[in-house]
Amino acid sequence: MNQSKVTVHNFHVSRKTPRGKFSIVVKDLSIPDSDNQQKIPIVGKSGAGKSTLLNALAGMIIPEKGNIKWTLSDKSFEFSNASWNEQTLIYLRRHYFGFSFQNSTLSKHFTVMENLVYPQLLAGKHPKKAKQNAEQKLIDFFENENIEKLKYRFPYKELSGGERQRVAIIQAIINDPVILFADEPTGNLDKDTQEHVMQLIFKWLEEKKNRLFIWVTHHENDPKMAGVEQYIEVSKYGDNMGTCKWIERKGIS
């Protein structure tokens, strides 16, 4: 049973755009609406505020009004303007949240292995265990490739876009997060590589029932490919406001 839940109440956040201030306003939102749905796509037109909403859910943007409350197993964490706590966010990022973005967060100065070991050390894992875990994840995601060569390569000089994206996803899940946030994780990839990368994420997701995957996508078929009938739809009203709602469609086609 999925024990992760987030509620958004009277939420308001703004960002600057070339046309002025753009605001995301959400009165009430509760996800997931089902105890067994592990995949939550965020869909909508470009510029409607999908990434802003994702960043807010992940605690990377401070709400100007309202609050976001996460319930993770038996613990609760709230994001609001009044209760913002950097130490709590650091704790969540190291123990509960993982992030995968279209623009990779991998360090160009680290090898593949160093990029995967370093976040584990920050979370307190023993160096030997961290290396073993990183090597196993590389085997899982690069089944037919030479892992011994791959782990000493530098991501931006010696990896293709698809290889780099797979390593970035491994980095996002290396500390076994409960929630994986992804902002268009396959946006720069060709169709075949997109599907391959998403299937790797889904495989990881299904290994444990308490995991939750929330991702921004501009691919209209993502909900169908993920096999979900419930998702978040972000809509834009005029040039300066966006909002979202929970959508449920039976038999998506």
Image (cartoon, grey):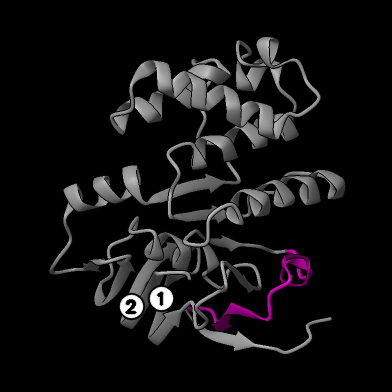
Q: CA distance from mark 1 to mark 2?
A: 7 Å
Q: Quadrant of residue 29?
A: bottom left
Above or below for 183 versus 230 = above
Please, what secondary structure does the residue beneath circle 2 have? strand
The structure residue drawn at horizontal position 56% and vertical position 81%, both measured from the top left corner, is: 236
In the rendered structure, which segment of residues is drawn in magenta?
Answer: 219-240
The structure residue drawn at horizontal position 36% and vertical position 51%, both measured from the top left corner, is: 96
Q: Nearer the viewer, residue 111 or 120?
A: 120
Residue 11 placement, left or right of 155: left
Above or below for 51 versus 26 = above
- Residue 155 placement (x, y as % from top left): 62, 22
Which residue is identified by label 1? Answer: 23
Residue 84 placement, left or right of 183: left
Q: Are marks 1 and 2 in contact (CB under 8 Å)?
A: yes
Q: Quadrant of the C terminus?
A: bottom right
231 drawn magenta:
yes
Q: Nearer the viewer, residue 221 or 132?
A: 132
Which residue is identified by label 2? Answer: 12
Count of numbered circles on the image:
2
Residue 65 placement, left or right of 203: left
Q: Quadrant of residue 37?
A: bottom right
Marker disc for residue 193: none
